[in-house]
Amino acid sequence: MRLRDSFARFSKWQQTPRSYSDQGLPTHHCANCGHEFVGNFCPICGQKGTQGSVSWKAVQESIMNLWNVDSHSLPITMWQLLLRPGYLISEFINGRRQVSFPPLNMLFTIAVGYVFIMYLCGESYADVQIVQDNTTLFETATNWLSSHPAWGMLSVTMIMILPTWTLFHFAPRNPHHTLPKGIFIQLFMSSLMFFCLIFAQLFSGFILLIPFYYYAAYRQLFGYRFWGTMWRLLLSAIIWFSIIVLIAMILIIPSNLKADSLLHLLIADLFMVGFIVALLMVGYWISKHSARRRKDTTKAIQQ
Ligand SMILES: [Zn+2]
């Protein structure tokens, strides 16, 4: 019973980790412009209410500002990303920016941490050998991506934008999300994937955290139940893989290709494009219909 209680408290915290109130705000005398005000920031010049006296805290804040880390929000954001990923992303894309460290900055910081940890473990993060004479565009691309881990991770997760947008378009939570929102969703997911890779360095079985986190984050973000989230994610993964195969097929074209094999490759590419579009359309259609059915049942319950 106690375990259930603490789990209930944990899931409540996941949904609303903090609340804002203007009760008990201190009155400040702005050290910059002399204005008397209530709150955290001066409404005339914008300086922080607590800023002014030069203390050890001011020294620490200056150092943190150098790394663009404002008031420790990076560790807090990382912690929240690990424990309540979908809710954090949902808050961010709905305009509650103050809860989160800027996601792109976070991704690059975590990528640097990942490279550093790999270095400590005595491994090079780039397994692909750097070829001097790149014969195909594909090799150039994979070399570049593996030597730029943050951009590499980002380009791998960004492929999820399209399946996410079509399959989760009529979700109970965050419906009709826009493509820019989709970019931010995958930005957060990229950071999360780096965490999974770091954990997998400790114990290789932790690589399973990658599908687990995609499930947990999408369930919290879009509000589908177990199977609703599951089949959409599985279909997304198939589409994601097909898009990677398609990109590889396009990039792999060697320079000395005969016209007839070029034609074969072109037909194969077109077939792949058709396959991906068909999967996207089927997922979109089923999602749209299940959303309509959901609306009908809620209407029937209300009547
Ligand atoms: Zn002021």
Image (cartoon, rainbow, N blue to C red):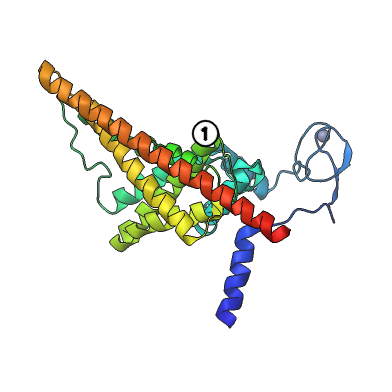
Which quadrant would residue 230 be assigned to in this image? bottom left
Q: Nearer the viewer, residue 207 or 43?
A: 207
* Camera sees residue 232: yes
Residue at far right of view:
36
Residue bearing mark 1: 179
Where does the image place residue 53, in percent across and percent down from the top left?
75, 44
Specify the quadrant that holds the N terminus.
Answer: bottom right
Considering only vertical position in the picture, is 29 above or below 76? above
Question: Where does the C terminus fall, quadrant-wise?
Answer: bottom right
Decide: few, some or many residues near mark 1? Use Cα within 10 Å; few <14, some 14-19, many ≥20: few
Residue in the image at 50% along x and 46% along y: 287
> Tag 1: residue type?
Leu
What is the secondary structure assignment of the residue under circle 1? Answer: helix
Rendered location of residue 107, percent (x, y): 46, 42
Q: Is residue 28 left or right of residue 174?
A: right
The image quadrant where one finds ligand 1 is: top right
Q: Nearer the viewer, residue 27 or 179?
A: 179
